[in-house]
Image: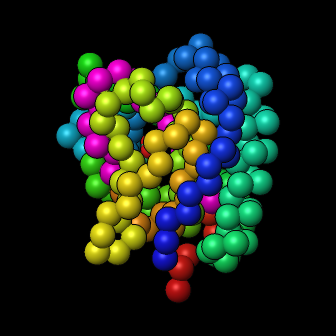
Amino acid sequence: MGVHSIEGGFTPKECDAIVIATNAAPAQEALLVGQNRDHNLRRSDLVWLDEVDGMGWVMDRLIDVVRKSNRDRFDFDLREFAESPQIATYEATEGGHFKWHSDIGDGPVARKRKLTLVAQLSKPGTYDGGDLEVMPGAHIVGASRAQGCVTIFPSFHLHQVTPVTKGTRHSLTVWAHGPAFR
Ligand SMILES: O=C(O)CCC(=O)C(=O)O
Ligand SMILES: [Fe+2]
């Protein structure tokens, strides 16, 4: 099952507005499913979109994009958005990265993740590295780095963010949930 890419899911102006609003909110160090702090696996700061004022329109857009993508490409049984979208900040100075992982976890909510959506919030020229790569089969698909581009894939696919080696990368992730695959 493939990786779906939607150019212009957000405009560059909208991406900048999300980053500016996020930077004003206090960040938490990213925890993994199961709440373990493992810098070897992941190094980034996280802000929950629900905790940033004036971001309701962002959730509305994400819902539209997921609905359309699911209708056109996946046809999964999706029922809810059970978690707040997360905005991640990967800093070169901190070796920001996220090693190969699947988003389906053991917890009651992470277990129900079915589609993962990632929006590129940073301009491609402002950071080096920080590539989102997805493995839908025996090959690796590199996500578009275009600002505002949205990449959608089944949450069980392995994916990684390569280390950021210069500058800062911001991304927005949201999951759509539903009954377990069978
Ligand atoms: O930042 C990204 O591009 C991906 C983030 C991710 O894989 C996650 O939050 O599970
Ligand atoms: Fe992930």
| In the rendered image, the vertical position of residue 55 relative to residue 113, given as above or below | above
Residue shown at the point (73%, 22%) measured from the top left: 53
User: Residue 24: image x %, image y %?
Assistant: 59, 13
User: Compared with residue 167, is residue 75 higher up or lower down, i.e. above or below?
Assistant: below
In the displayed structure, would residue 35 be above or below residue 153? above
Q: Residue at x 55, y 76 (%)?
A: 180
Residue 1's place in the image compared with 53, above or below, is below
Picture quadrant of residue 12? top right
The answer to whether residue 106 is seen in the rendering is no
Query: Is residue 114 or residue 17 the one in the foreground?
Result: 17
Q: What segment carries the magenta color?
A: 160-176
In reply to whether residue 60 is colored magenta, the answer given is: no
130 to the left or right of 68: left
On the image, which quarter does residue 175 sit in? bottom right
Which secondary structure type mostly characterizes the magenta part of the structure?
strand
Viewed as shown, does residue 118 lie left or right of 51? left
**Residue in front for this viewpoint, 77 or 18:** 18
In this rendering, position of residue 6 left or right of residue 63: left
